[in-house]
Amino acid sequence: MTPFADLLDRLAFEPRRNAKLALMEAFFREVADPERGYALAALTGGLVFQHAKGGLIRGLIAERVDPMLFALSYDYVGDLSETVALMWPERPGRNAPPPALSEVVEGLSNSGKAALPGLLSGWLDGLDETGRWALLKLITGGLRVGVSARLAKAAVARLGPVDADAVEEVWHGLAPPYLELFAWVEGRGAAPASVDPAPFRPPMLAQPLDEAELAALDPTAFRAEWKWDGIRVQAACGTAEDGRRVARLYSRTGEDVSAAFPDLLGMLEFDGAVDGELLIIREGRVEPFAVLQQRLNRKAVSPKLMAEFPPRIRAYDLLAENGEDLRALPFDARRQRLEAFVAERGGPAFDLSPLVAFDDWEALAAIRADPAGAGAGVDAEAVEGLMLKRGDSSYVPGRPKGPWFKWKRDPKTVDAVLMYAQRGHGKRSSFYSDYTFGVWRIGEAGEELVPVGQAYFGFTDEELAQLDKFVRANTINRFGPVREVVHEPASGLVLEVAFEGLQRSTRHKSGVAMRFPRISRIRWDKPPGEADRLETLEKLLPA
């Protein structure tokens, strides 16, 4: 456990991507099996413990520390694992060695609920502060050390002459502690055999477009298509060795989300893989993302929910068909295959995302600004922008520079008044970095502020320090960890908030909900009384 804890501690304080890669590579080289395999599983989100939850941790610390002291400490630190790791009382004279990571994983996986408190207490007694923090992070599942699953797999690939994409190709057929994987990348064994008839294929991603680069690009070399406001998915189907039809729906990161869409999977009758956007379409119209969210992350889906929120895949690309891998073909060739594929097999399960015709970049810019007038019609509100893809580009995993670009529509903005603030987590636990903001409306008592959203990013470190200072100096009330900040027409702070879209909401007092709100500017120059009104936002709601 100690080497793993040291790795997490160093990763948490290392902001550079290449340095994180080097730390993980060194760990995987120096630590033996199965310890390094379980560490990889933790870094990639592959460990889930049925009975070990945050409530268990709170119960154990409540038996050892005054509850009020813990509550005050947790409020200040802002992170459960860090707070408990620091407050856990030492046991002088204890000589038991710290547990191995494999011992912890196997204990948490195989022990019953009644045995876990004693097991966890013993481990915490045998670890130092860093070890306790790592153990508790492992249990809660949120490591928060700035490492994605893709980055961890890339670090493993560096152990031998294998690239990260090759690791991705075999990943879904593997299980912790990944002995076959490490043997393969180190040249001690063959590549793990994948017999999965519906495997995940690593997606190709687009680079954000810098509009200054357009002049250097040849418009005739690119194809344009709408960027839809859903979630990127991959539908994979095939036939197992025993003759069973297997269909799966993967998210962009490779997570199997099939359980939330059994109705969609039941309609997939092909052999291959389709890359597209998952949308909810009712009466021929794409619904807002907020509607789609009501079907995501569901463990069980009722017939009523399936009837009310019918899903469909809007197909972008065809990656495989009838056992043939199409990814090496140029985009134009894959597009022809996709059009024929959808014409033959499309319907309620999936349809074709249309290409957008344009003559030059000026014409495309006008299309981007007005999707409704350029063919998107009633679905214009579901268009996030445009995708640009070179006609000769093969389908390459990752985010290569040059073949694909995403040209998103400019975000909407509103000037809102800061109302409440709360401390962040991890590195931000000492700062008030989570903000609730509102706009004006006419209420029963006259002009009043009504909350319209929350944001915790978009600002620089320097601006965070300024915002934190303002919150501390202008607090007028406290509600547990939340501070209420002065927000009167003549005094307070205005924030320019950028967001991707609005939808109606019955869960919010204002009746509106923002998509991806973030702080784009601090309006020190604007008095709160001149902030925007709710009517301004309501005009931006889809019809």
Image (cartoon, grey):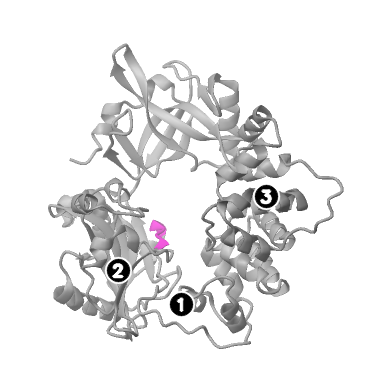
Question: Does any portion of residue 128 appear in the rendered image?
Answer: no
| Vertical order, 101 against 168 (above or below) | above
- Residue 385 numbered tag: none
Secondary structure under the numbered disc 2 in the rendered image: helix
Q: What range of the chain is rendered magenta?
A: 207-212
Question: Does any portion of residue 176 appear in the rendered image?
Answer: yes
Q: Determine crowd level at label 1: few under 14, some 14-19, many 20+ residues with C-alpha closer than 10 A.
A: some
Residue 17 is left or right of residue 458, and the answer is: right
Q: Position of residue 84 (x, y in %)?
A: 67, 42
The C terminus - image quarter: top left
Residue type at mark 1 is Glu
Q: Residue furthest left?
A: 283
Q: Are marks 3 and 1 in contact (CB under 8 Å)?
A: no
Of residues 131 and 230, the one drawn nearer to the viewer in this rendering: 131
Find disc 3 in the rendering and name its residue.
118
Q: Position of residue 5 (x, y in %)?
A: 70, 57
| Vertical order, 492 against 227 (above or below) | above
Find disc 1 in the rendering and name its residue.
169
The residue depicted at 48 percent of the width and 27 percent of the height is 420
Q: Earlier in the sequence, mark 3 or mark 2?
A: 3
Of residues 403 and 394, the one drawn nearer to the viewer in this rendering: 394
Number of numbered discs overlaid on the protein picture: 3
Task: Give how far apart the Cα atoms at labels 2 and 1 are.
Answer: 33 Å
Q: Position of residue 155 (x, y in %)?
A: 60, 70
Residue type at mark 3 is Gly
Q: Are marks 3 and 2 in contact (CB under 8 Å)?
A: no
**Quadrant position of residue 387:** bottom left
Task: Give how far apart the Cα atoms at labels 3 and 2 are.
Answer: 66 Å
Residue type at mark 2 is Pro
Secondary structure under the numbered disc 3 in the rendered image: helix
Secondary structure under the numbered disc 1 in the rendered image: helix
The residue depicted at 59 percent of the width and 53 percent of the height is 139
